Amino acid sequence: MAEMREPIESGCPDPWQYMHPVMRKNFGMWKYHEHPRPGVLLHVAYSGDKIWTVKAGTQRILDVFTLRKLCDIGDEFAEGYVHFTIRSNIEYLVSDESKVQPLIDALEAAGFVVGGTQNSVAMISHTQGWLHCDIPGTDASGVVKAMMDELIDEFRNARMPNRVHITTSCCQINCGGQGDIAINVQHTKPPKINHDLVANVCERPAVVARCPVAAIRPALVNGKPSLEVDERKCICCGACYPPCPPMQINDPEHTKLAIWVGGNHSNARGKPTFQKLVAAGIPNNPPRWPEATAIVKRILKAYKEGAKDWERINEWIERIGWPRFFEEVELPFTKYHIDTWRGARASFNSSSYIRF
Ligand code: SF4
Ligand code: SF4
């Protein structure tokens, strides 16, 4: 059995101490696992030991009262050991099958939804949004709540051809990642500069250096040091806004949502894939984002009806081809969707040198 590692000043604590004893005992010695029902996994060890994992969705931004409620359920109906997954689900571990159903009943009675395993629509991963970050152009947890309200039956059941990972990202430049379906902010206008504030708030060389297409130049405006943007070059990425809030790019009308599909970080069965843009200029319409949700539902319906068992969204599209994908999901195909990466030699940052 592995030893506890020495404490270090930073980083997450050693997980060994928090592991269920059956998992510790059988570490690395699992024979197989099964999926007895949506939301439950059964792992069987070579020693004959068994452990059941019950997964429930949470609202991700967790208040202390909800956390206490989840922990109380774990103490009363499980064996006091939980995991949180990267998609904000909580997983309870029990070594006795008779505890599984009472645990599910207790979670559902408290309003949590059990599911999210195997070929379901997993909980949407989200960035920090209006609650925690200072630069978002939309919310993230709000989009998740609005969409999951409509997709909850697909979380509760495992009826999709394969697992579906949906992600959100509330700016174009920082967190977020590849997803089978990704809902990302899209700015459509260059930033508006408040020249009175730039000299007081921004380090101008840092802002100039931040622009990926060298569209920002130092300038004197009304006798004060400020910045100017070459709007013909600007790609509306928003990278200048975090180091210089007077370069405001968020806008209730011109900040939109875009939907991308087919991204996959995994290299388990094939190479990782980049997601590709399929819908742009979607209204950024809180609190329910109905236009974006409708498109996500159309994509999921077409995938569910058209994909073969075990095909992920990128594999399904690869097989049927992009023209047919756009027909099936009833989205217009425009020239803006085409990127064959032929320009990648010039546009990818593949060395440590900065090019303009
Ligand atoms: S995606 Fe951008 S705006 Fe959203 S939390 Fe991350 S850094 Fe902030
Ligand atoms: S939005 Fe992006 S491309 Fe436009 S000026 Fe700012 S950093 Fe440059």
Image (tube, rainbow, N blue to C red):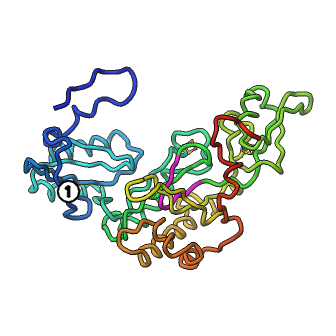
Residue 298 sits above or below residue 124 on the image: below
Residue 251 x, y percent position in the rendering: 70, 51
Tell me: 47 left or right of 28. Answer: left
Taking the image as shown, residue 3 lies to the left or right of residue 119, namely left
Q: Which residue is found at the position 72% from the left and 49% from the top?
A: 236
Q: Residue 30 location, x and y as percent?
A: 17, 49
| Amino acid found under the numbered disc labelled 1 | His
> Eyeballing the image, is 343 above or below 319?
above
Image quarter (top left, top right, bottom left or bottom right) of the C terminus: top right
Q: Give the labeled residue for mark 1.
A: 33
Q: Is residue 280 left or right of residue 29?
A: right
Query: Does the magenta portion include 283?
Result: no
Magenta segment: 176-184
- The quarter of the picture showing ligand 2: top right
Q: Does the stretch in magenta take in 182?
A: yes
Quadrant position of residue 279: bottom right
Q: What residue is shown at x 15% (from left), y 59% (from top)?
A: 101
Q: Is mark 1 within 8 Å of ligand 1?
A: no
Query: In which image quadrant can residue 240 be found?
Result: top right
Residue at the (29%, 54%) spot, across then down: 56
Q: Residues within 10 Å of mark 1 (few under 14, many from 20)?
A: some
Query: As rendered, which of 10 and 245 lies closer to the eye?
Result: 10
The image quadrant where one finds the N terminus is top left
Location of residue 116 in the rendering, given as x and y in whole percent from the top left corner: 32, 59
